Amino acid sequence: MSLTAQARDFWRAAKDLGSLRSGAGLPRWAWLSGGGAWVLALGLGVGVYGMSAAQVVLALVLVLPLCAVCARGAGQLDVSPVSQVGQLSQVAAGVLLPGGVGPNVAVGGVVSGAAAQTGVSLWALKAGHLLGASPGRMLGAQLLGVLAGSLVSVPAYLLLTRAYGLGSEALPAPFAQQFRAVAELASRGLDGLPPNALFAGSVAAGVGALLTLLARGRAARWVPSPVAMGIGFILPAYFAVTLCLGGVLAAVARWRWPASTGRNVPALAAGAIAAESLVGVALGALKLLGFMA
């Protein structure tokens, strides 16, 4: 439903991509680096993630238009439908190139990963523009961030998964669970679902569609987020309760002290999330080193 509501973005994104056919505004090095990235992605997809060459090519073909849609959404609505376009690519791969669960997840991961970086890059460029930064220097900073991020995020991921286990109660990875469910459905069909899962999924889909439609009307401020509700079903209860309590505390603080908390709540929340993440990495390292049980 959320993608249907952004149907105009698909048409406008197609126009955006059509303007690139002449190569206007793109230097030669951009085309060369893009081609090199395609070759690298093809090699990694086949050699590391067990994808077929056709699956990698399909993911790379879908990347450009779906990232353009996410760019439109990030710029116009401040919302980038990352998970939706990733799952849409999974469905396309399941229909056109059926295969195992792992390669199907990888197709969705390629598309959603690029889509996520598209939105984040645009928000960063917007912030830099407001601060008067040079576009060329911002691009250089982003490329430097790619290198630094790969050197930090991969070891951190390996540390966390070895310390806590991916998909465990301590590291539930709710969006990964969504991608796995879509991959199982795309590769195995309805027969691969657990008993009553089709009925439960149909009810949940109807509720999610209804909430999405209501959120675009006058009752928007009173309608809960269907994404938040869905994640609440996937996460352990103490995660969802903690998030709910944080939202209630923020609402009370904004009501009681509107002048001092109006702009500070997002900064406080971001600081808490960053601190919790750093502490989690530190505890994982201590656990692997044998200092903690």
Image (tube, helix red, strand yellow):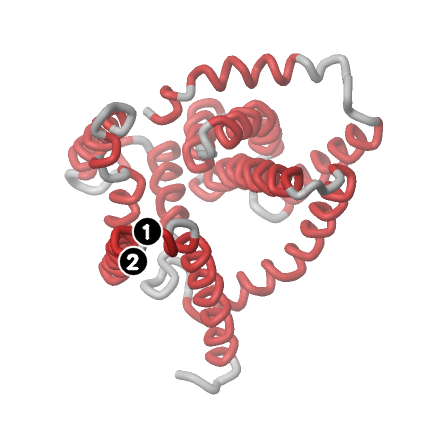
| Coordinates of residue 278 in the picture (x, y in percent) | 50, 68
Residue nearest the viewer, comparing 174 with 16: 16
Q: Residues within 10 Å of mark 1 (few under 14, many from 20)?
A: few
The quarter of the image holding the N terminus is top left
Q: Quadrant of residue 241?
A: bottom left
Whether tag 2 and tag 1 are in contact, CB under 8 A, the answer is: no
Q: Quadrant of residue 224?
A: top left
Q: Residue furthest bottom?
A: 291
Q: Residue furthest front?
A: 259
| Coordinates of residue 212 in the picture (x, y in percent) | 27, 28
Residue nearest the viewer, comparing 200 with 283: 283
In the picture, measured across the screen, residue 163 lies left or right of residue 23, that is left
* Residue located at (48% from left, 28% from top): 73
Kindly identify the amino acid type of the residue bearing the numbered disc 1: Pro
Kindly identify the amino acid type of the residue bearing the numbered disc 2: Gly
* Residue located at (36% from left, 52% from top): 259
Disc 2 secondary structure class: helix
Does the image show residue 235?
no
* Residue located at (53% from left, 29% from top): 75
Which residue is tagged 2? 246
Which residue is tagged 1? 258
In the picture, measured across the screen, residue 218 lies left or right of residue 6, that is left
Q: Is residue 181 above or below residue 148?
A: above
Q: Residues within 10 Å of mark 2 (few under 14, many from 20)?
A: few
Disc 1 secondary structure class: helix
The quarter of the image holding the C terminus is bottom left
| Coordinates of residue 144 in the picture (x, y in percent) | 73, 51
